[in-house]
Amino acid sequence: MAKSMLIVSRHSPWSGLGAREALDIALAGGAFELPIGMLFLDDGVFQLLPGQQPAALEQKDLAANLQALPLFGVEDLYVCRQSLRLRGLDGQPLALPATPLEGPELADLFDRYDLVITL
Amino acid sequence: MKFAIALFAPPHAPSSRRALRFAEAVLAGGHEINRLFFYQDGVHNASGNVVTPQDEPDLPAQWRAFVERHKLDAVVCIAAALRRGVLDAQEAQRYGRTAIAVTPPWELSGLGQLHEAAQQADRLVCFGGV
Amino acid sequence: MTTLHLLSQSPFTSPLDSTLRPLGVRDGLLLCGDACHALQPGSAPLELLEHLPASVAVHALEEDLQARNLTAPERVQVVDYPGFVELCTRYDKVNSWL
């Protein structure tokens, strides 16, 4: 049976390659039909803000690639509620259907996966 | 145990040296390394073009010696490498670039190799950040 | 599944509370690099670490303590590289906070 992998994405979308290269690991895993989950934590939660305009920075649309996650079989998406709260985003609509988790639930989440990569 | 080791930081980062010392200890402890995977800025550790001052540890040279001595499977993520100008002969020709940075034992390949190594190993240990 | 969390960033630039949020009661921590500054006497990160449940084993990499002239408090176990490898085998998986 395939090992499950949780990818923890902590970088904001427009701070370099961190967000994109974390997503690439998730998409590659999905393409190989591996059980992959993704957790958005710290500034990673900014990736989920709707209505962003990457063209203003001459950047590719990360949100479009994030939307591809379910198409690659990556549907287990989570977001740290405390990270949202600290950034004034708790309760706001998110661009992706990510399940908000509190501290102890994060510990449970980590427990459930065989592998974790944090970027 | 079988270890897959991934490195995301460049040669001058403390975590590159730390990853190498860890890898050495893995083998010295009687364990195996099924793959080394270099991603993000870690691709620079595979570059033959890095010139380290004489009075500093030459991490790219040390990594190369380690891989060669133990005949390890050493993979560099091709997408990450291209962005960072760390090309092998084939990619340099493909894109019309002058510098060849990656030569055997390093091999440019995809993220699938990271996943495969992680699936087959008993432990995946990543190094990066600082 | 238990996790060994590897920390290598200074707790003053990369606050510990995010890292400690998913910490399970049987998980372990290994401080390397600038994360060893969390052992700075009189600091808030040290206080945070000392208040972790006793079931969470905290370790620090010897070379990083030496380089920074830091001493490990009693609850922190100092390890060398062979010890680092052994820790990785003791926990079910390893997560590096990058």
Image (cartoon, coloured by chain):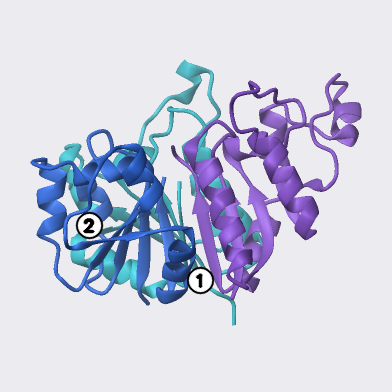
Quadrant position of residue B91: top right
Residue B51 drawn at (x, y percent)? 70, 22
Residues marked 2 and 1, same chain: no
How many neighbours does mark 2 have within 10 angstroms: few (below 14), some (14-19), or many (20 or more)?
Answer: some
Give the residue at mark 1.
A4
How many neighbours does mark 1 have within 10 angstroms: few (below 14), some (14-19), or many (20 or more)?
Answer: some
Residue A48 drawn at (x, y percent)? 36, 42
Helix, strand or loop at mark 2: loop
Residue C11 drawn at (x, y percent)? 24, 40
Query: Residue lying furthest bottom in this view?
Result: A1
Q: Colour of chain C?
A: blue
Q: Which chain is purple?
A: B
Which one is in front, A114 or B43?
B43
Taking B93 as reference, is B1 above or below it?
below
Q: Give the residue type at disc 1.
A: Ser
| Residue A97 in view of the camera | no
Which one is in front, A24 or B62?
B62
